[in-house]
Image (spheres, coloured by chain):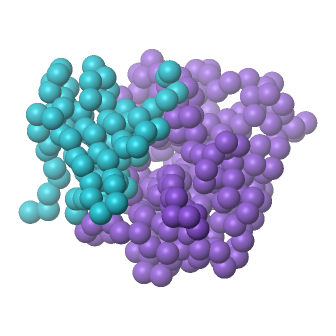
Amino acid sequence: MTDTWVDGNDLAGTLGEIFTMDVTMAQGACVSCGTVAMLGEARVYNRAPGLVARCLNCEDVVLRVVRGPGRAWLDLTGLRYLQLPMPD
Amino acid sequence: MARAAVLGRLTWRVATVADASRESPTARSLRLDVPDWPGHRAGQHVDVRLTAPDGYSTQRSYSIASAPANGRLELTVQRVDDGEVSPYLVDVAESGDQCELRGPVGGYFTWDPTDREPVLLAAGGSGIVPLMSMVRARAAAGSRAPFRLIYSTRTPETLIYGDELRQRHRDDHGLDVTVAYTRERPPESPRPPGRLDAALLAESGWPVEFGPTCYVCGPTAFVETVANHLVDAGHAPERIKTERFGPTGG
């Protein structure tokens, strides 16, 4: 089972279609355990119709994204917040 | 910085295969022409999408192998036998063929030529690809950042970029290359076959007090093992950047 996930970097392409910036560089706080980490460090399970990102500490789901024809679903209920690097 | 390249929503672009060259029995490098390609940062990847005549489409992520350049990039793809994308890219695609490409993506596992601290690159198998982009970017930019590359591969036959690494080890000042064969070694290799372990990392990597940035890329188990060795040796976890393939590309 340890070999079934990849790094959060894998989210970059799909989220890059939605956001104008690289969200894998954003810090996210896990709802379950409070761990703050870059989305690029999350554990991503990608052998499914969508992408599921899990907290690197408690492994609860922090983000889910599914891309379909003409639309995308984005579930962020696993995140308390996202802190995004922004140009001033 | 190249940050402007990651601002703005990503869209799929059409890429055309310019040429391809065999790197090993199961890996091939493809040079792609991509109109309006904005360049990339060393270590980034792209998503490649193939669409069948019946409309079925599937996509996979591949690391960019080349140094940043406008309009063209090179991918090195390792074949996964039951994969849906890699067998086409490794064995079928030829000059003039087209595919869709989205990127460059990923700002986390990147090296910038303005970085000056020592760098340790640890590659397992085709995990060498994004690290090769860093080695090439370093040379292209004339960077003097000290680099040490430790590359773990099964046999001389599975070695990717063998000739180029030998040449760069000789000519790129400040670049050290150590190849660790895990199953079978060539006669000139001084080390018995074996996994990349703590002793080899200590011998061919950097002392902790040099404060290196460590980039580790390969299959999940390889990355876990090497990252744990580095933390155990005292390297700061935030200076260890990892990229895992999981069950490998496809």
Where residue B176 appears, x then y in whole percent? 63, 45
| Left or right placement of residue B248 versus residue B6 in this view | right
Q: Which chain does cyan denote in the image?
A: A
Residue A36: x, y in percent?
19, 31
Q: Does residue B150 appear anywhere in the picture?
A: no
- The residue at 72%/71% (across/down) is B94
> Chain B appears in which tint?
purple
Residue A8: x and y, percent? 36, 40
Image label count: 0
Q: Quadrant of the N terminus of chain B?
A: bottom left
Question: In the image shown, does A70 or B22 lie closer to the viewer?
Answer: A70
Q: Position of residue B104 (x, y in %)?
A: 41, 62
* Viewer-closest of B174 and B80: B80
**Depth order, front residue of B23/B141:** B23
Residue drawn 36% across the image and 42% down it: A51
Is B125 placed left or right of B246 in the picture?
A: right
Q: Left or right: where does residue B93 sit relative to residue B139?
A: right
Residue A56's image quarter? top left
